[in-house]
């Protein structure tokens, strides 16, 4: 491939597991990707460590006030930005070519919409923003493949669709799940699982919140909603199956009876590079090994058990109802998972609490993305009130 001009990147969510994988890709392909700016919520120390590796000179913290201690530790000439407006500032910077969103929570909604409106390409792995404000994010897309998925499942679907974000000719989109740590465990024993057991994912290394969501399969429910936004597919055409081998990450079934699958090693760097390098295909200096064909030929696909994984079906129902239900679910799940991680509720209480507050919710349809964010907060408030806690802790 001919040398091309470097792509200057603004990375939102740099210190999380996906963000660190993005940094690793940038380090591997230094001539192609340059980290212009990096943002995190609170972890200034980790941000500075990443700066030492990458030489990035623009750093943003959205959740903490200015700290002269950390500013002294940063490289000379570092430009510091603070607050949620900092995300919009780095996204709209004229020197930035590509905005990569690897954060969680809804604070990325505004910078994503602003970046798309300004014509910038965006690669995204932020479920909450897409679920809560999908209508406004997809409505801001100005050209084909301006908004590309980083998550392995959605990136796999995009590849199966011929690297297009369109469901034309598609009968069904199928996402896969490993089944998590409790695939073979008796369902009646899940009431007594520990936090340590829940956080022991057999395939992926992720942060605590998303690991809990993966164990409960709420994450897969979020992902089918995410697919609906990214590819313009209604709920009836999006589903998920358990694939314990974790070779295949996405399947597309077409109206003509054909089916395409995308298989690759469960390594986030692969879909990240695929999206960030588009339309080119770059070769890894030391390529993550593809699964041997002999292994890929052994593939198991299982239905998601409603008894063992009720969260998936709660999410699927919210997807079908639409309106404010998806945004409300985002907030309710975040609060319930945080309560579990704090040891205040049992694992099985997560779906029970969420289902209870959703049944009481009116389903108000937001008129703007700002209102959708308020619905997310409302979902969290309702869950915490059920347990006697009134404060809502927005981690976005």
Image (tube, rainbow, N blue to C red):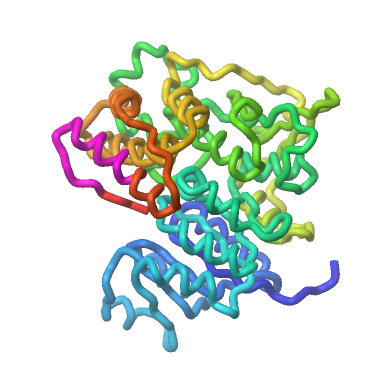
Q: Give the range drawn in magenta.
A: 377-392
Point out the residue furthest to the front here: 367
Q: Position of residue 262 (x, y in %)?
A: 73, 37
Q: As displayed, is residue 336 above or below residue 269?
A: above
Reply yes or no: does residue 204 show up in magenta.
no
Quadrant (top left, top right, bottom left, bottom right) of the N terminus = bottom right
Q: Nearer the viewer, residue 382 or 202?
A: 382
Q: Position of residue 229 (x, y in %)?
A: 59, 43
Point out the residue furthest to the bottom here: 77
Q: Is residue 225 left or right of residue 59?
A: right
Residue 60, quarter of the rendered image: bottom left
Q: How many marks?
A: 0
Q: Residue at x 66, y 50 (%)?
A: 270
Q: Residue at x 58, y 61 (%)?
A: 24
Q: As displayed, is residue 8 above or below residue 360?
A: below
Q: As displayed, is residue 361 above or below residue 380?
A: above
Q: As displayed, is residue 144 above or below residue 78?
A: above
Q: Where is residue 23 in the image (x, y as percent from the top left)?
A: 55, 63
Q: Nearer the viewer, residue 102 or 138?
A: 138
Q: Residue at x 37, y 53 (%)?
A: 396
Reply yes or no: does residue 389 show up in magenta.
yes
Overall secondary structure of the magenta stretch?
helix
Q: Residue at x 57, y 59 (%)?
A: 22
Q: Where is residue 205 in the image (x, y as percent from the top left)?
A: 48, 43
């Amino acid at each position: 491939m001919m040398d091309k001009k470097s792509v200057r990147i603004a990375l939102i969510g740099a210190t999380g597991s996906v963000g660190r994988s993005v940094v690793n890709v940038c380090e591997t392909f230094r001539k192609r990707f340059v980290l212009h700016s990096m943002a995190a919520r609170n972890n200034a120390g980790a941000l500075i460590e990443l700066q030492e590796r990458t030489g990035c000179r623009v750093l943003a913290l959205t959740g903490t006030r200015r700290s002269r201690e950390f500013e002294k530790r940063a490289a000379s000439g570092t430009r510091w930005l603070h607050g949620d407006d900092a995300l919009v500032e780095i996204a709209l910077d004229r020197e930035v070519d590509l905005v990569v969103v690897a954060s969680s929570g809804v604070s990325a909604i505004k910078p994503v919409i602003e970046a798309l409106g300004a014509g910038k390409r965006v690669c995204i792995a932020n479920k909450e923003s897409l679920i809560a404000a999908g209508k406004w994010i997809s409505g801001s897309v100005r050209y084909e493949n301006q908004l590309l998925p980083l998550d392995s499942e959605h990136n796999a679907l995009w590849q199966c669709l011929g690297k297009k974000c369109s469901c034309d000719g598609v009968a069904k989109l199928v996402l896969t799940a490993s089944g998590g740590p409790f695939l073979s465990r008796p369902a009646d024993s899940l009431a007594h699982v520990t936090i340590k057991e829940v956080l022991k994912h057999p395939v992926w290394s992720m942060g605590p919140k998303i690991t809990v969501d993966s164990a409960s399969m709420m994450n897969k429910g979020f992902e089918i909603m995410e697919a609906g936004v990214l590819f313009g597919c209604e709920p009836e055409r999006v589903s998920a199956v358990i694939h314990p081998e974790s070779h295949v990450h996405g399947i597309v079934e077409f109206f003509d009876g054909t089916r395409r699958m995308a298989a690759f090693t469960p390594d986030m760097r692969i879909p990240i590079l695929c999206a960030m390098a588009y339309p080119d295909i770059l070769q890894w200096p030391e390529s993550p090994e593809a699964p041997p064909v002999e292994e890929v030929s052994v593939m198991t696909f299982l239905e998601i058990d409603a008894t063992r994984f009720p969260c998936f079906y709660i999410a699927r129902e919210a997807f079908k109802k639409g309106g404010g239900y998806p945004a409300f679910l985002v907030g309710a799940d975040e609060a319930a998972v945080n309560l579990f991680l704090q040891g205040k509720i049992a694992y099985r209480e997560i779906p029970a609490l969420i289902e209870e507050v959703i049944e009481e919710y009116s389903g108000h349809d937001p008129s703007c993305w700002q209102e959708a964010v308020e619905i997310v907060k409302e979902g969290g408030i309702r869950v915490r009130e059920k347990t006697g806690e009134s404060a809502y802790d927005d981690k976005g």
